[in-house]
Amino acid sequence: MNLEFLITSLIVVASPGTGALVTLAAGLSRGVRASILAALGCTLGILPHLLVASTGLSALLRTSTNTFEAIKYAGVAYLLYMAWMTLKERGALKLESEGRARTDKEVIWHATLVNLLNPKLSIFFLAFLPQFIGPDEDRPTLLMLELSLIFMAMTFMVFVMYGVFAASVRDHVLSRPGVLRWIRWGFAVAFVGLGIKLAFVQR
């Protein structure tokens, strides 16, 4: 296995992003189980991007401005929606005691949607993975699939660690309303920041 691929993938996965924020929020607001489900959802959200890249449909994102922009701004809108709902205490940091708890399916779907609406992942698979597939490779599609599955496994493991850490400090945070309020604002600002950053992503 290419060590450079593993190191670079780990850096990409561990870098703060929407998936990490959603997993951290799940751990803080709902505990270990929800954080693991969120990590699973974020990982599943990679699959459509893998499918697009492996079937050559990524060329559509590269050549069709309208398609790319539609996906990009859908992602921006969802991030801004998450920021607003977080501030309204009905979003990512909604506590289980505050009304009906989210089902496991809802936690997974929410996390999946976050990465599904992230065109940067398609760009990642289009621009990054091919660098590790030589022109003389006998089975390039199979190799891309193998590397993608490794990337997904790394994503799941790193996000689980984020979520478990967040869950471990959950009681300390929830017992301090002032700290929770600042965390809500921090997450909301982070979602807005990621939305603005995404808005300027180019093909």
Image (cartoon, rainbow, N blue to C red):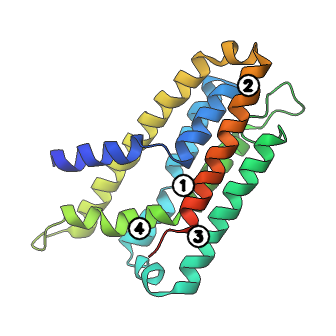
Which of discs 2 and 3 lies nearer the camera? The answer is: 2
> Where the C terminus falls, by quadrant?
bottom left
In the foreground, 163 or 108: 163
- Determine which of the numbered discs, if any, sits on residue 180 in the image: 2
Residue 140 sits above or below residue 154 on the image: below
* Residue 161, percent from left and from top: 47, 28
Residue lying farthest to the right in this orientation = 99
- How far is disc 3 from disc 1 in space, using C-alphas? 15 Å
- Asked if the residue at tag 1 contacts the one at tag 3, i.e. Cβ–Cβ closer than 8 Å, the answer is no
Query: Badge 3 is on which residue?
Result: 72
- Asked if the residue at tag 4 contacts the one at tag 3, i.e. Cβ–Cβ closer than 8 Å, the answer is no
Identity of the amino acid at label 4? Answer: Ile
- Determine which of the numbered discs, if any, sits on residue 123 in the image: 4
- How far is disc 2 from disc 4 in space, using C-alphas? 35 Å
Q: Secondary structure at mark 1?
A: loop
- How far is disc 3 from disc 4 in space, using C-alphas? 11 Å
Q: Residue at x 48, y 56 (%)?
A: 46
- Using a 10 Å C-alpha cutoff, classify the residue at mark 1 as few (fewer than 14 neighbours), some (14 to 19) or many (20 or more): many
Q: Secondary structure at mark 3?
A: helix
- The numbered mark, 2 or 3, whose residue comes first in the sequence reads 3
- The numbered mark, 2 or 4, whose residue comes first in the sequence reads 4
Query: Badge 1 is on which residue?
Result: 45
